[in-house]
Image (cartoon, rainbow, N blue to C red):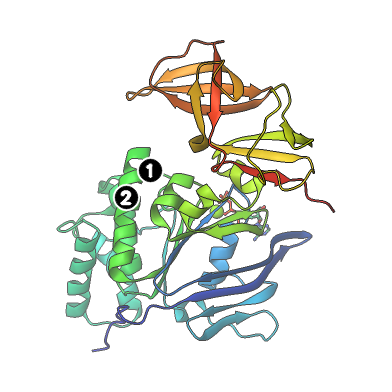
Amino acid sequence: MPAIDDVSGRATPVLMQGICQTFGQTQVLKSLSLEVSAGETVALLGPSGCGKTTLLRLVAGLARPTGGRILIGNTTVVDAEGGAFVPPEGRKIGMVFQDYALWPHMSVARNVAFPLEMRGIGKSERESRVVEALELVGLAGLGDRAPGTLSGGQQQRVALARAIVARPPVILFDEPLSNLDRELRESLVVDIAALLRRLGMTALYVTHDHGEAFAIADRVAILRQGDLLQVAAPEDLVSRPATVDVASFLKLGVILDGQVEDGALVLGSQRRLRPPQGFLNGDRSGQLFLPRSALTAAAPQDGVLAAVARHSAFRGDGYSVQLELEEGSFLDLHSPQRVAQGEQVGLSVAWDRARWFPQVLL
Ligand SMILES: Nc1ncnc2c1ncn2[C@@H]1O[C@H](COP(=O)(O)OP(=O)(O)OP(=O)(O)O)[C@@H](O)[C@H]1O
Ligand SMILES: [Mg+2]
């Protein structure tokens, strides 16, 4: 009986080098390079149409890149220059998609067993592996059910069991939770993260949901229009976004245009600010990024910045208040009290958390 690959002790890195993908005139991926270390989970986060699925399909072998190469472990699975190409079934990859992709006419157990059947694994070993996989995803005892009789969350767990049953060293997820409601997403993402760590799999997890990416990933790669803007641990992305685009995409706070005049910062209608020495690093105009964590609501006369409350919503543990700092520059801030619409609010600034992005000179 052939032994089933066990991932433990031989987790496999995935390396994408200079990946280009062009459809007709459109360049969807622009020389993208990314390494997912052995046993690491990287979330690929980006808006609709930025190229996330395209990249996953290239790693899975469902399409070929127009440029670059991909290594899984030490094996070059595709090289646009050299012509190497390992087909999907030779790549030992598990996949979980948004739409579950279960076969409705087969029982849950047969769905899960399918990758083992494909590998010619015998019946008794298959059965014990399926039971184990269903247990791992929290579906023990449901093997005889038809997929259509399960809830959406349960069906996605079946798809997860099918993806891990053969213990592939690498697993790819394409927005696996986006058909589920928020509460279910939040609990399932934690379960998937725990399972990946337990099995030591290398994972690339596509999502357009920041919360999901932050919950599951060791590192998050932010993709926009075929380019990686930043790849970093969630904590580092939040505290040190590399560019204004990253801060803006992650909706981490507010971004204000500013000029530097005699060492002071001039922001629209705000009073002149005097940030600490060295903060502005030069006299170029630029953009001030103020993460929510850098701002505290204060009485209007005590604040460094002035804002107007536009909207206040009760959130159980206080209020979420929408503030307008400059025309069109909004920020949601937590407040223990309700703030009336139109009320003036002062904001104090923790400069050590704020960032100044001087205009880039071309
Ligand atoms: N086979 C194809 N032929 C032509 N264009 C394609 C093809 N596949 C993808 N595209 C285009 O490439 C771009 C990126 O598509 P992709 O599916 O990778 O986006 P995505 O980031 O996964 O978006 P979403 O979050 O909506 O799933 C889109 O503009 C899409 O129309
Ligand atoms: Mg997609």
Q: Residue furthest left?
A: 141
Residue 275 x %, y %: 64, 37
Left or right side of 278 for 137: left
Residue located 59% across and 47% down the image: 47
| Quarter of the rendered image showing ligand 1 | bottom right
Q: Are marks 1 and 2 in contact (CB under 8 Å)?
A: yes
Residue 358 x %, y %: 74, 46
Instruction: Name the front one of labels 1 and 2.
Output: 2
Front residue (pair 247, 106): 247
Residue 62 can be seen in this image: no
Residue 180: numbered disc: 1
Residue located 49% across and 21% down the image: 298
At numbered mark 2, what does the secondary structure look like: helix, strand or loop? helix
- The quarter of the picture where residue 319 lies is top left
Relative to 75, is 293 above or below? above
Front residue (pair 134, 323): 323
Disc 1 Cβ-to-ligand 1 distance below 8 Å? no
- Image quadrant holding the N terminus, namely bottom left
Relative to 288, is 316 above or below? above
Front residue (pair 26, 233): 233
Left or right side of 130 for 232: right
Q: Residues within 10 Å of mark 2 (few under 14, many from 20)?
A: many
Q: Residue furthest right?
A: 362
Residue 194 x %, y %: 29, 59
Residue 117: numbered disc: none
- The quarter of the picture where residue 268 lies is top right
At numbered mark 1, what does the secondary structure look like: helix, strand or loop? loop
Q: Residues within 10 Å of mark 1 (few under 14, many from 20)?
A: some
Residue 188: numbered disc: 2
Q: Residue furthest front?
A: 277
Residue 202 x %, y %: 41, 70
